[in-house]
Amino acid sequence: MTRFIIRRLFYLCLTMIIATLLVFSLSRVVGDPRLLYVQEGGYGLSEEAWEAMGVKLHLDKPVAVQYLYWLGDAVTGDLGDSMLDRKPVVEIMWDALGATLQLAFFGWIFATFLGVPLGVLSAVKRGSVWDYLGRSVALLGQTLPVFWVGIMGILIFAVKLGWLPVGTRPEEFSFKHFIMPAVTLGWFSAAGYLRLTRSAMLDVMDSEYIKLARAKGVSATAVLWKHAFRNAIIAPLTFSSLVLAGFITGAIVTETVFSWPGLGRLAFSSVDDNDFPVMVGLMLLFTFMFLVVNLFTDILYAYVDPRIRYG
Amino acid sequence: MAEVSTGLRRSRFRAPTWQQVSYVLRRWPVAPIVILSVLVVVGVFAPFFAPHDPLLTELVERNTPPFWIGVQTEFRLVAQQVDKLSAEDRHKISLRDARKKGFADAKVGETIELTVRPAGSFNHIFGTDQTGRDILSRAIFGARVSLMVTAVSLTSGLVIGVAMGLIAGYADQIFPRWGKHLDEGIMRIVEITFAVPTILVALVIVIVFGKSFIVLLGLLAFVAWNAFPRNVRAEVLSLKTTDYVALAKISGASSFRILFVHIFPGVINTVLVIATLRVGQLILIEAILSFLGAGVQPPKPAWGAMVADGREYLGDAWWIAFFPGMGIFLVVVSLNFLGDWMRDRFDPRLRQLD
């Protein structure tokens, strides 16, 4: 187990280094990274600032050394200043993190509590109304564009019916404001959970030990929840990494639709403002979060299923 | 003689029974094929099908609803003076304005029925947007843009991805000494591209290289390629142990010839299925990028960007955002059904993909 974890950790570091290399080489593609400031749609730099930046980024040294300096800064939490308002990128991201985490939490709750039970239902009552409902939800989740779901939600529930507020997240907590963004964000993942639960459940229900349990007279409820569900839930449990991948794209779109003051909208506005440092910071942060969650699910998976550990 | 000929004539055409129709509908993905063919034909011949110029702005006709929606009127009380900013006077109209709107004999104190929004007409079937551009025409030209983007990026992604998969799977035969490492290296790269969030890389690249069509094509090709190597490689690994490949080798065929003449035809099914399933994702990603303003640039119409436009006018004109979104949805659903159907038919082993 320890060897497994060490291997995965090493892999995480490797991927992170490649991600930083990618970002770094993108910033050097134009030659001098300061040119990003003075390009069309840039912000301009004063003579002194130009010089100061050259010193800070060690532009007089070879590119490989520049990378190491930059990497050192990044690891110690210095990702430079944003171009738009010259505030440290880390500070800007820290301010936006809370809103995104809250939204992601509610989105995840929605996805799990819609996806897993409906998946079980549609597997157990195969061919029934529930199955059709489940399969349509799965299909819609996979094919409806996230931003359109959000916008149609606003149109129906806020503009036409007036049940839910249109506005963004208020200063103090209000559950009503979370409903639509959370549903929009969780929609795609709910479909993912549903399909996974359904196929895992169908697999398990078909296995020999379930037949044995039935044959020896275990009650239907016990077979379902004690024998089948416990084994079927492993796959959806470890699905979290894919959920997170969906959440990263989803957060950018959802937060843009609902003007949610989180990391996703920061990504949107930094594209709009051509704010390279902020975007780089966001990419590194999201990649890191993604890899960490991946690591945890891998460990969880290996813990639950020994075949993975030694595979 | 005559009886025989009538018998023949009768058997020439028989209306299909309901069972036969439903059998065909179940066996063949009719609806997806129809939707996609309509899309392709309309998209390719967009200038022929579009009723209006997609870029022509007619401010007089802005926010015209779709054809089935009638006139929207409101009752207003005619008053001498109206403070337009106050909430109390919202239901009033000044005498001068009323006269201007065509109520020449309006008097103070009278209630008039004012047209707030004109009725929809067949001139603009799906209505117009905030600057009076015809939505149907824009959607048609948007389909054309989407088609082009996905076709180009999928083709280049497919060529790169399949080549990578073929090389990775067959590397140890071509380069006996270090082929294994090449295989390992390629698969590692593929794995890492799965670990980095695509859309963020796309946004970083857009900032560095600017928002342009070429950048978008490159980005989507990058998104498209990594779906192929893994499955193609797996297929090659199993095909290269077959007898006919061994026989080809014995008869002296070169590695290159074996790979392309004997192995490649065997992976085409897999490639087709993955490609169909990928197109839907590409269209969605293109729509998301355009929605975020990082994809197809205005004034060029794109479905994602049209939805983004409509977001601002939801209260007045829902149709601006509705129709392009519906278009994306229909196309992606059709591609999904078609992909599933092809998978079940050509390569059932890929079922484990989802």
Image: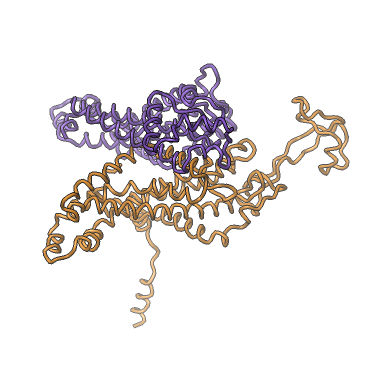
Chain colours: A purple, B orange
Q: Position of residue B343 (x, y in %)?
A: 30, 51
Choose between A35 and B300: the one closer to the eye: A35
The single residue placed furthest to the bottom in the displayed view is: B1
Q: Does any portion of residue A218 appear in the rendered image?
A: yes
**Residue B37 vs residue B346: left or right?**
right
Q: Quadrant of residue A232?
A: top left
Q: Residue B307: x and y, percent?
A: 55, 42
In this rendered view, identify the residue nearer to me: B195 or B112: B195
Residue closest to the eye, B29 or A170: A170
Front position in the image: A230 or B172? B172
Q: Looking at the figure, which quarter contains the C terminus of chain A?
A: top left
In this view, the residue farthest toward the top is: A172
What count of labels does the image hold? 0
* Horizontal relation, residue B10 to residue A146: left or right: left
**Residue A98: horizontal and vertical position, in percent?**
46, 21
In the image, residue A275 lies at what x, y percent? Answer: 52, 34
Most extreme residue toward the front, as rendered? Answer: A60
The residue that appears at 30% across and 53% down in the rendered structure is B162
Quadrant of image for the N terminus of chain A:
top left
Q: Is residue B325 visible?
A: no
